[in-house]
Image (cartoon, rainbow, N blue to C red):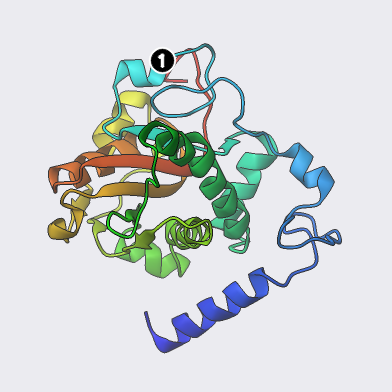
Amino acid sequence: MSFFQDFAEKIRNFSAARGCVCDCCGAEVFFYPKERFCKACEKAMTRNDQKTCDKCGRAGISDGVCLTCKSRMPKFDKGFSPFVYRGVAAAQINRVKTTKRRLSYYFAENMAQTFIEHFLLSEEEKDGGRYATNENPLLIIPVPLSKKRRVERGYNQAEDLAKTVCAELCKRGYFAEVDLEILEKLRDNAKQKEQGFAERIQNVQAVYHVRKRARCRERTVLLIDDVMTTGATGSVCAERIKKAGAREVFFLVGAALPERRNNDE
């Protein structure tokens, strides 16, 4: 990271804790950053707090594993997402990588809360101790962009999310660290939204590569991305990380497409 990039990030972090208007519509917010959205915008977001798939964590039609996972079980151990990728939630997380980078703080804070509530606390209850400790910190890895795409955009939204998720976990007393260089994307693939289910899986097979394999050995990894559709990207990345020696890989995203009866829809 260059001096200017580091300075710009410090400014973003400083301003993110001292705003006074809704990050979505610009209405006045009195308890920022505890409340980053106004009441109306917050209410419009579809939270993923009903039935969820036992494997990928997407909003499900029924209990158990969703149809997408049954068709091809993901390689990550479990997935989590605070929001359903529809309506206002979908529109806002799409803005993170197009027009409003600042929104990454809102989604990342909710992602960290979801991971704590739906995984870390339950694991601590079972084992009777802190899950992510100084001796065994979580290794947080963002899904990378290709070098070309990152230069075009100027940043990787998954990196922004990963850094804030890490900061939030550390604030709550968990030990975590981010490594932006472990996983790399070798080339651009066709856009996933233009592909059917089977095509999406094939589309990402030879795209991702683990550079620092030793960093993954015997580690618990938290893989971070903005959106999950079929889960193909998360699955392939998790498979690569596990082959590098990781003990387990969890996939945490800002919003996930809900279960559909036909995976090719």
- Relative to 133, say whether 5 is above or below: below
Which residue is nearer to you in this view: 85 or 126?
Answer: 126
Question: Taking 206 as reference, is 11 above or below it?
Answer: below
| Neighbour tally class for label 1: few under 14, some 14-19, many 20 plus, Cα within 10 Å | some
**Residue at image point 85% right, 58% down:** 27
Residue 190 falls in image quadrant: top left
Q: Residue 263, image x and y in percent?
A: 42, 19
| Residue at point 62%, 61% (across, down) | 99
**Relative side of 212 to 255, left or right:** left
Q: In the displayed orientation, state which residue is furthest to the front.
A: 128
Instruction: Return the residue at label 1.
Output: 67
Q: Amino acid at mark 1?
A: Leu
Residue placed at 52% from the left, 31% from the top? Answer: 257
The image quarter in which residue 183 lies = bottom left
At which x and y percent is residue 212? 17, 61
Image quadrant assignment for residue 249: top left
Residue 161 screen position, x and y as percent: 49, 57
